[in-house]
Image (cartoon, grey):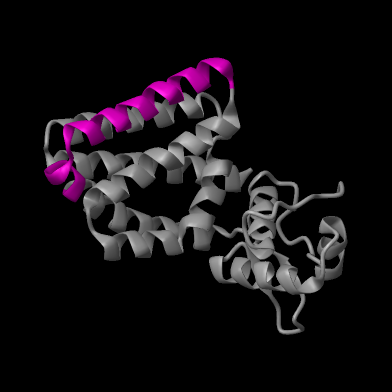
Amino acid sequence: MNQLSLQKALPYYQQIQQTLKEQIWKGEYKPGERVYEAQIAKQFSISRSPVREAIRTLIHEGLLVMDDRSQISVYKPSWEDVKDIYDCRLSLETTAVALAAERITNEQLHLLDQVLRDTEEAIIKGEKSEIVVLNARFHDLIIDYSGNRRLKKLVEELASLTYYYRSLNIVGPKRAEAILVGHRRIFTAIGEKNPEKAALAVREHTEEDLRNLSALFEQ
């Protein structure tokens, strides 16, 4: 990989953590690939200490794993893990969207609508990475608008792996368009202040994501 540089604004370990995270999400590090502390330190022209801290954080987030020999490698997805993560998401996000439908303000509703407009524009331009970012943004806003801090904390524990699967889930015919349709249904239900309809829309949207991921795993 190319030589990488760091800024002084943030602690080095946070910058390394974010860079590695994005490289994993983009597939620059492959599932199961070994990760070497010394190699990363050399790429950033930095000591091993912040690299070690970044790796420790990414292990906690689930994007890196350590085996019984203390060897570090990139998270390798399994269908069982996908189902476990999406079961958690389904439970948390249906609760969050029901709360959001009850509590959302007109200003917040406008921001959600803007995300949908931006997503449509990204689809027209074929900007897949931006679509993934906006997909996450839409769901994150709903979590915020639920007003439940404990729920938000639980969702954040799955955030890195959830984004990882969103990056995979964009693959497939008309997937971006299907995601946008699902988001519009959720948005409509929230706008109608209908918690039950909103929760059902999230459930259908999540189950559609799972079906697409299942097809990818079968391939």
Residue at 23% across / 59% down in the picture? Answer: 148
Q: Which residue appears farthest toward the bottom when viewing the image?
A: 68
Q: Is residue 70 above or below residue 104?
A: below
In the drawing, does residue 185 fall left or right of residue 138? left
Query: Is 96 left or right of 132, judged from the image as shown?
Result: left
Q: Is residue 164 above or below residue 154?
A: above
User: Which residue sits furthest front?
Assistant: 8
* Spot occupied by residue 72 in the image (x, y as percentages of width and height): 74, 71
Whether residue 14 is visible to the viewer of this picture, yes or no, is yes
**Rendered location of residue 69, percent (x, y):** 77, 84
Specify whether residue 196 is in view.
Answer: no
Image quadrant holding the C terminus, namely top right
Relative to 58, 100 lies left or right: left
Read off the magenta span: 99-126
Residue at image position (22%, 54%) is: 147
Instruction: Say which quarter of the image contains residue 13.
Output: bottom right
Q: Position of residue 195 (x, y in %)?
A: 14, 44
Residue at figure coordinates x 56%, y 71% from the top left: 60
Residue at 25% across, 36% down: 108
Residue 116 among magenta residues: yes
Residue closer to the observer: 168 or 102 = 102
Residue 73 horizontal/vertical position (percent): 73, 67
Front residue (pair 35, 81)? 35
Q: Main secondary structure of the magenta part?
A: helix
